[in-house]
Image: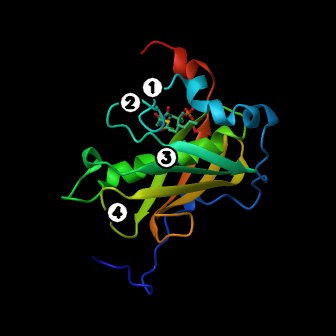
Amino acid sequence: MTVPNPARRTSPRSDLTTPPPDAAEPRVDPKAELDFSEIGDVLGNACFGCGPEVPHGLRITRTGHEGSTSYGEFTVIPEHQGAPGLAHGGILAAAMDEILGTSAWLLGGRYVTGRLETDFVRPVPVGSRVHLTARCTGVHGRKAYMEGEGRIGGPDGPVAVRAAAVFIEVPLEHFTEER
Ligand SMILES: CCCCCCCC(=O)SCCNC(=O)CCNC(=O)[C@H](O)C(C)(C)COP(=O)(O)OP(=O)(O)OC[C@H]1O[C@@H](n2cnc3c(N)ncnc32)[C@H](O)[C@@H]1OP(=O)(O)O
């Protein structure tokens, strides 16, 4: 199996996902924190990322958080394949979107992904348990800057994917208006 070259420069962060110097420190909203273990119920459990019964979904479980840093896990199943025996990159990006969105949730607003950047560091075999971590690195107006990684096999396992993102705070109408 391919192993990453340690000398290779990988950074998922562009200028667009780097908080500006005057960004505020993230502050966790106690009300969002109270809902943390029930986010799926609050959102209706139909989510491809975390719905517990969505066919072939990621079924990510949120295992905890410390401040705006959140943790989750999922298992790569055969339906998540791209190349034979390996997770599709889009699946890994979706998993990162979900855990980054979980950290954005903890800030208390309604956030959607505006930009998502990913580095695919090593292939992820089907059957792997992927451990996800995400955190907020700053808030500027409606923008929350996020970053995180996915590791194979355990919280200290090898990094398989890294991501950085900007989430944008939106009004409730974003979800309710007819299109
Ligand atoms: C717990 C739940 C977990 C769920 C995890 C899953 C999360 C998701 O996948 S959400 C679904 C995917 N995302 C979407 O569907 C969003 C679709 N896009 C949109 O609706 C709009 O483009 C939206 C809301 C992001 C921005 O539009 P709008 O509200 O008009 O904001 P706009 O005025 O353009 O931008 C606001 C600020 O954000 C910045 N911004 C907007 N888009 C981007 C972007 N792609 N990259 C960087 N910055 C951006 C703008 O530059 C602007 O910055 P500033 O305030 O400094 O001028």
Q: Residues within 10 Å of mark 1 (few under 14, many from 20)?
A: some
Q: Secondary structure at mark 3?
A: helix
Mark 1–mark 2 Cα distance, whole angstroms, equals 6 Å
**Label 1 beta carbon within 8 A of ligand 1:** no
Q: Look at 38% across and 30% down and name the residue there.
A: 54
Tell which residue pokes out farthest to the bottom in this image.
7
Quadrant including the C terminus: top left
**Label 3 beta carbon within 8 A of ligand 1:** yes
Mark 2–mark 3 Cα distance, whole angstroms, equals 17 Å
Q: Amino acid at mark 2?
A: Val
Residue 90 horizontal/vertical position (percent):
34, 50
The chosen color scheme is rainbow
Residue labelled with disc 4: 124
Residue labelled with disc 1: 46
Of the residues tagged 4 and 3, which is closer to the observer? 4
What's the mark number on residue 54? 2
Closest to the observer: 14 or 153?
153
Report the side of 45 relative to 134 (left or right).
left
Mark 3–mark 1 Cα distance, whole angstroms, equals 16 Å
Whichever of callouts 1 and 4 sits on the residue coming sooner in the sequence is: 1
Q: Secondary structure at mark 4?
A: loop
Residue labelled with disc 3: 97
Mark 1–mark 4 Cα distance, whole angstroms, equals 25 Å
Tell which residue pokes out farthest to the left in this image.
84
Q: Amino acid at mark 4?
A: Val
Residue 95 horizontal/vertical position (percent):
45, 48
Closest to the observer: 5 or 53?
53
Residue 122 sits in quarter: bottom left
Residue 49 horizontal/vertical position (percent):
45, 39
Query: Are dots 2 and 3 in contact, CB under 8 Å?
Result: no
